[in-house]
Structures are given as C-alpha cells and as structure tokens.
Image: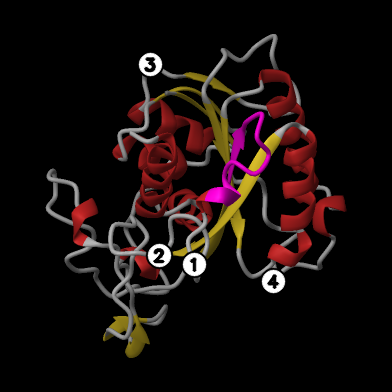
Amino acid sequence: MRIGSLFSGIGGLELGLEWSGLGRTVWQVERDPYCRAVLAKHWPSAERFDDVCTVGASTLAPVDLICGGFPCQDVSCAGKGAGLAGERSGLWREYARIVGELQPRWVLVENVLSGASRWLDAVARNLEELGYATLPLPLAAEDVGAPHRRRRLFVVARRSADPDGLALRQQPGGSAGTDGPASPLARIDGARGDVANSYGHREPQSQGCVEAQRQRPSDGGWWSSEPDVGRVAYGVPARSHRLRALGNAVVPQCAEVVGWVIREIEGW
C-alpha cells in the first residue's frame, strides 16, 4: 500500500504502519517546522506539505491509505470542550475533505480516548457519508507493553460497497480483531508491575502486552525496559521541541498493531 499522512507530527502513525509491513509512506502534511525536519530525516523520499488547508487532489498523489491524528485540544477532557466546532479540532473538516477528494481504500483516524464522546460519532458519521465502513479500536501504550497508559482511539475505515464489511468481522465479546488467541490485539491481563510516574517515582500499575507472535525480529520485542521519566530533561538539544513533539506523538507500536488488524481484514 501507499500511505499518506495528515497532521503527521514526527511520524508515529506511519512508522508503526510501515513496521507492520502494510506499505510505504509517500507524502506527509505537517505545519510545525521542527517536526517536518524530523520527518525529512526519516522519510527523505516522501513529499512533504505544510498546510492541510491548502492540499487536496490537485497536490497530493493518490494513496491506498490516509492516516492522521487531527488536533485534540478541543476534544480532550483537558480542554474547554469545544469539540469539532473548535478552531483546532475543527481541522477534522479538512481531513474529511481530503479523504473525499482522494477516496483512498483505507482511512485511519487517531485521537484521545478520554474525549471520544466529543468526536467519535461525528467522525464516524462523516466517514460513512463518504462511503466508508468504520471500526473503532481503543488501544493504549500499556497494551503494547509500555509502562504508561496513553489511551487512544483508532478509527479504522474501509471504502467498500458493503457498508457492514468491517462489522461482520466482529467476534463475540469484543470488536473485530480484538479477541481470540490469534488476534494481534490479544492481551495478557492481570499482570502488574512497578512503573515510573512523571516525577521518577515507582508506583504499581497494571500492564497489558501484545501477543509475542507480533514481535519484530529487528529488536526481539516491544519494550524490554523503560527508564524513569523525569519532569525535566536537562542538556537535551532542542528539548522543548522534542518534548512537545513526543507529547503529541502516536506510539508507533500501537499503530503497528492497527496495521496488523488492517492486514488481517485484507487477508494478507
């Protein structure tokens, strides 16, 4: 597949999708200059644009999948709750416009799980109006073995003549692809461990992990360990830019799992 990315940040979504073997990234749209520099380093052959409001079918190459996490400030529980009517999260309208113009086979939308009531129904409705069947997949960093939660909701959408094409793949007791021993989202529940909070102190927290069958041979697994997370990182070049970019980024290992779900639906 050829992948296009909107609101790319530092490329967490497309990196994870590429790890799953889904395809390669051919273009990215990101307004932040620092993030674009990171993208240029890791995707030197991809075409880059700086404004979702000025791109479309006339500027973007056709792709099989468009991914992106539109701004969360107006839909997050930490914000004022303006929802998709807000100035920032309202950029979802540009996302939907681009999807309508390019009509890729697949669309992957990511945003915060905590504020899903402020965006999920409208996003799913917009995608369905564009001819896509949708499937929401809640997934957290702890589900892929990280010692922190970072809960997100991924909306997988496929353009299909059969609007129930994705729903038909649901398994008893959960959403499609989330249950069963062969699922890429299978978890080992009940495991607990000490993890670092934002002050560097250790505290118990539940952890899940993705089934070992999805390990990448390049590194032998997901996280073997993760250091304590301090509140401030001293002596790191461009640390404010890096910390902001990391704070906004999608965990690539989560995106990789979603890539495996898409591959499973495609029958690869």
The CA span between labels 4 and 1 is: 34 Å
Q: Depth-wise, is mark 1 or mark 2 nearer the camera?
A: 1
Q: Is residue 215 covered in magenta?
A: no
SS at badge 3: loop
Are the residues at dot 2 and dot 4 in contact (C-beta closer than 8 Å)?
no
Residue under numbered circle 4: 78
Q: Do the residues labelled 4 and 1 touch (CB within 8 Å)?
A: no
Residue count near mark 1 (Cα–Cα under 10 Å), binned few <14, some 14–19, many ≥20 = few
Q: Are marks 1 and 2 in contact (CB under 8 Å)?
A: yes
Q: Nearer the viewer, mark 3 or mark 2?
A: 2
Question: Which residues lie in the magenta part?
Answer: 156-168
Q: In this view, does 90 lie to the left or right of 223?
A: right
Disc 4 marks a residue whose amino acid type is Ala
- Nearest the viewer among 217 and 105 is 105
- As drawn, the label of residue 172 is 1
**How far apart in space, not on screen, are marks 3 and 4 (Cα)?**
37 Å
The image position of residue 224, as x and y in percent, is 17, 65
Which of disc 4 and disc 3 is earlier in sequence?
A: 3
Q: Which mark lies nearer to you, 2 or 4?
A: 2
Disc 2 is placed on an element classified as loop
Residue drawn 66% across the image and 19% down it: 102
Determine which residue is flagged by label 2.
Answer: 179
Residue underneath mark 3 = 45
